[in-house]
Image (spheres, rainbow, N blue to C red):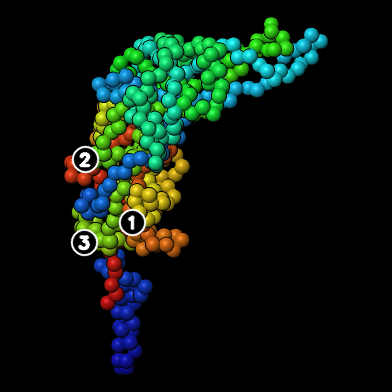
């Protein structure tokens, strides 16, 4: 009997069984990489931050285009609004006896009314307050004036003869009830109008104040309504409105720089600059280490989201926000020339991060996240999308500078509520081939 075919058949059968149990394309499941894992990592200030500095003095009250009134608000703040009016009309148009119209180039300004438009929503008072109007008689500079100085420019510092806009000549006082209207009017005579008509006189203008203590009032704008008599027809009186040329406010006291913490906004505005170091490796959280092992090298493409997390803080009561605060974050392009360093494009968009005023008082300690994903990715790559060195400092500022006399405060390093860096990334273990 020939045994060779039988042996061959047995070998073939064994091979067939083996093929059925282990397909030739299979891989040992023990060498497959684990599924990618997405985790959130939180870095403390010591792990990511440094070099925090708070700088004052960006912009001036005259840039704001509005004003503030206060008398012993929160037991400390006094504020007054100063303004000048634009040029009076040179001609008026009147009807003649034929029914046509003629230009009168010699109008007579008989009387007028100063209108002070107030903002009930941004003001603290719920009850009526007494608003005052006075005429200035000292040279003053709207861009640099302060509570103590009428002019405060390089090479020219002139104090008010009395702090708080000097010894202004009283023009009247009116009661403003925020429940009834938003404007108070002060009548003025022709002599006062003649003084304001000279727009070249740097010693003319108005000062608006509030006598009722304990409130902070927001002034939206000022205007001057004129009753103009025609020399062509004395029986004709024309109404004309003059807008403001200058508008600013002065206040006392000016807040001191914070000994700790973060400050943003105000008038002039505050900025806070800090160093942000992107982590090259992570040693947590535990879920990450258990899954892929630590330390884990961080690749910029693994980062889905990164944000600076701040905790709100109640600042000085007199400067507490009463309206929404818009926060912005921008890269500092030349930290060696701070505080005058140019800044890069906003990391938060044109609107910024909106924060409600209640979070700085009743809601103190609320978390505010400001995304910085691209900034962190650029640091890990070592350069920006345009090939420039990646910045390592950011500036925290108000989206609009200035925006309000109030400013936002946050807890700083060393506090239990200090800033932290939040990172969400997706990663997996590295597979090594045998």
In the rendered image, is residue 35 in sight? Answer: no
Q: Residue 76's spot in the image, x, y percent?
A: 26, 24
Q: At numbered mark 1, what does the secondary structure look like: helix, strand or loop? A: helix
CA–CA distance in space, label 3 to label 1? 36 Å
Tell me which numbered mark, 1 or 2, is placed earlier along the sequence.
2
Q: At numbered mark 3, what does the secondary structure look like: helix, strand or loop? A: loop
Per the image, the residue denoted by label 1 is 336
Per the image, the residue denoted by label 3 is 294
Q: Residue 8's spot in the image, x, y percent?
A: 33, 87
Residue occupying the point 59% across, 11% down:
110
Q: Quadrant of residue 269?
A: top left
Alpha-carbon neighbours of circle 2 within 10 Å: few (<14), some, or many (≥20)? few
CA–CA distance in space, label 1 to label 2? 22 Å
Tell me which numbered mark, 3 or 1, is placed earlier along the sequence.
3
Residue 259 is labelled as 2
Say which of marks 3 and 1 sits in front.
Answer: 1
Depth order, front residue of 179/279:
179
Q: Is residue 195 left or right of residue 105?
A: left
Residue occupying the point 48% across, 12% down:
186
Q: Quadrant of residue 14?
A: bottom left
């Amino acid at each position: 009997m020939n045994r060779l075919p039988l042996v061959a058949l047995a070998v073939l059968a064994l091979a067939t069984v083996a093929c059925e149990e282990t397909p030739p394309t299979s891989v040992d499941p023990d060498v497959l990489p684990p599924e990618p894992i997405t985790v959130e990592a939180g870095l403390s200030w010591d792990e990511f931050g440094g070099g925090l500095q708070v700088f004052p003095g960006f912009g001036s009250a005259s840039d704001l285009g509005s004003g503030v009134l206060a008398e012993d608000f929160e037991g400390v703040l006094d504020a007054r609004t100063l303004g000048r009016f634009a040029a009076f009309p040179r001609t008026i148009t009147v009807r003649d006896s034929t029914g046509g119209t003629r230009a009168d180039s010699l109008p007579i300004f008989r009387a007028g009314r100063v209108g002070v438009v107030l903002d009930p929503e941004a003001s603290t008072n719920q009850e009526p307050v007494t608003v005052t109007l006075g005429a200035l008689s000292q040279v003053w500079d709207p861009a640099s004036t302060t509570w103590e100085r009428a002019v405060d420019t390089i090479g020219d510092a002139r104090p008010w003869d009395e702090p708080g806009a000097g010894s202004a000549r009283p023009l009247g006082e009116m009661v403003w009830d925020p429940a009834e209207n938003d404007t108070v009017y002060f009548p003025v005579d022709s002599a006062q109008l003649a003084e304001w008509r000279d727009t070249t006189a740097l010693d003319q203008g108005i000062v608006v104040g509030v006598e009722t203590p304990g409130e902070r009032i927001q002034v939206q704008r000022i205007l001057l309504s004129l009753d103009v008599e025609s020399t062509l027809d004395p029986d004709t009186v024309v109404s004309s409105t003059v807008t403001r040329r200058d508008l600013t406010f002065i206040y006392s006291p000016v807040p001191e720089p914070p000994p700790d913490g973060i400050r943003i906004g105000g008038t002039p505005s505050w900025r806070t600059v800090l160093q942000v170091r992107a982590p090259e490796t992570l040693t947590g959280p535990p879920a990450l280490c258990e899954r892929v092992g630590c330390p884990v090298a961080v690749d910029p493409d693994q980062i889905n989201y990164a944000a600076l997390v701040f905790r709100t803080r109640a600042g000085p009561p007199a400067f507490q926000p009463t309206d929404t605060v818009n926060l912005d974050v921008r890269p500092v392009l030349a930290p060696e020339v701070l505080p005058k360093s140019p800044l890069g494009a906003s990391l938060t968009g044109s609107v910024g991060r909106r924060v409600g005023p209640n979070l700085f008082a009743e809601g103190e300690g609320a978390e505010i996240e400001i995304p910085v994903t691209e900034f962190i990715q650029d640091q890990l790559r070592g350069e920006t999308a345009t090939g420039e060195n990646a910045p390592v400092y950011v500036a925290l500022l108000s989206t609009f500078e200035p925006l309000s006399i109030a400013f936002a405060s946050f807890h700083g390093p060393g506090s239990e509520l200090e800033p932290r860096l939040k990172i969400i990334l997706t990663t997996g273990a590295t597979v090594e081939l045998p």
